[in-house]
Image (cartoon, grey):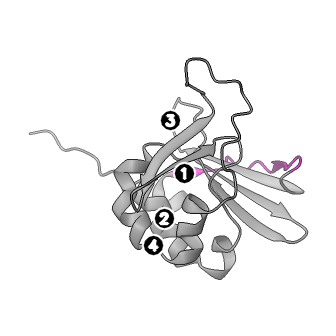
Amino acid sequence: MEQFGYSFGNTVGSGHCWGRYMLINRKSGAKSTNVYARIYIADRGLALRLFLNQIDEHREYIEKAPDFIKEVFVGKAADCQNCRRDVNGNCRFRKSYTIDGRLINKCNGLTFKFRELPLQKPDESIKLFLEFFPKKTKRTTV
């Protein structure tokens, strides 16, 4: 992650209910505290959880992605259960997007957790991460 400009700040935290430990990855050198990814370390292995937005902008990538990636976006896991009592049909915890012509609603508190990727498929982890968080090049001024 560091080669792409993200760091866990050399801090290993408690994974709470997600795993024994976790690494919280943020943009290196940025003032923002936005979390882009968490890596959970549990007794049963690693999990990568990405904090993704604007899913529809990445529809083509997701629709062509290998099944183990696509399943996280289209499968039943984290389906929205309308648990937050929507106000006027809006839920700040809901992620809504369309894949393969189907409207999908996921609960943001549970979404985009990849169990297979970190160790078994590191190249796919990198491709997925860079799809949503492309490495930015520095602008040159003339």
C-alpha gap between disc 1 and disc 3: 10 Å
Dot 4 amino acid type:
Ala
C-alpha gap between disc 4 and disc 2: 9 Å
Q: Within 10 Å of the Cα at label 2, are there few (<14), some (14-19), or many (20+) other Cα atoms?
A: some
36 lies left or right of 79:
left
Q: Main secondary structure of the magenta part?
A: loop
Which secondary structure, mark 1? strand
Disc 1 target residue: 6
The segment highlighted magenta reads 6-17
Q: Within 10 Å of the Cα at label 1, are there few (<14), some (14-19), or many (20+) other Cα atoms?
A: many
Dot 3 amino acid type:
Ala
Q: Are marks 1 and 3 in contact (CB under 8 Å)?
A: no
Within the magenta stretch, is there residue 12? yes
Residue 46 at x, y percent in the picture: 76, 68
- Residue 2, by quadrant, is bottom right
* Total labels drawn: 4
Which residue is found at the position 38% from the left and 65% from the top?
61
Nearer-N-terminus badge (1/3): 1
Q: Are marks 4 and 2 in contact (CB under 8 Å)?
A: yes
Disc 4 target residue: 65
Q: Within 10 Å of the Cα at label 3, are there few (<14), some (14-19), or many (20+) other Cα atoms?
A: few
Within the magenta stretch, is there residue 54? no
Which residue is found at the position 61% from the left and 41% from the top?
35
Disc 3 target residue: 30
Disc 2 target residue: 128
Which secondary structure, mark 3? loop
Residue 93 at x, y percent in the picture: 63, 33
Dot 1 amino acid type:
Tyr
Which residue is found at the position 64% from the left and 41% from the top?
108
C-alpha gap between disc 2 and disc 1: 15 Å
Nearer-N-terminus badge (2/1): 1
